[in-house]
Image (cartoon, helix red, strand yellow):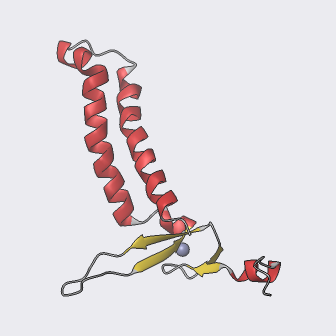
Amino acid sequence: MPNPRKTNLQDEDETSTCDSCGIRSKKGWSFGFKESVPEGMTDGGTVVKCSLCAIRHTQMLRRSLIVAIVVGSILTLLNQGDVLFAGDWNNPLYWKIPLTFCVPFCVATYGALSNGRR
Ligand SMILES: [Zn+2]
């Protein structure tokens, strides 16, 4: 009867090679992203990246930026709209508004990374 438990030797083999820089990373430290579908193809592949390359993945950063602009604008209007439209700009707004845009950016980036974690 085969032993379903993995040995340490098998765990060491569970590495992925980064498609960008070629570094091998252990399980849990590499991330998979769907590639954009080329013309004429029905399905794109998956590109595997190490953690350093994953946080610089352009498509993910672009998507996170769009989420930050949309959600950050809505949250800013909801939370600070009365102050902004009244023209009563005070000093805390200069850190509150940028932070309002940073939060959805971080959440979207974390979500993308945890979804693509391998
Ligand atoms: Zn890499």
Height in image: 115 above or below 81?
Answer: below
Rendered location of residue 32, percent (x, y): 48, 71
User: In the image, is residue 94 above or below residue 69?
Assistant: above
Quadrant where the image shows the N terminus: bottom right
Quarter of the displayed picture in which ligand 1 can be seen: bottom right
Tell whether 96 sits left or right of 27.
Answer: left
Is 15 on the left-hand or right-hand side of 56?
right
Lateral position of residue 72 relative to residue 86, left or right: right
Q: In this rendering, does residue 95 appear at all?
A: yes
Viewer-proximal residue among 64 and 111: 111
Question: Is residue 23 among what the camera can see?
Answer: no
Q: Relative to 109, is 41 on the left or the right?
A: left
Q: Based on the displayed image, in which of its 4 quarters is residue 8 positioned? A: bottom right
Quarter of image, res 76? top left
Give the x, y percent position of residue 19. 49, 81
The spot of residue 41 in percent (x, y) is 24, 86
Q: How many marks?
A: 0
Of all residues shown, which one is farthest toward the front?
1
Q: Residue at x 44, y 46 (%)?
A: 107
To which quarter of the image does residue 118 belong? Answer: bottom right
* Nearer to me, 111 or 109: 111
Residue 53 lies, with reference to residue 96, above or below; the image says below
Please name the residue shown 54% across and 78% down the image: 18
Residue drawn 80% across the image and 82% down it: 3
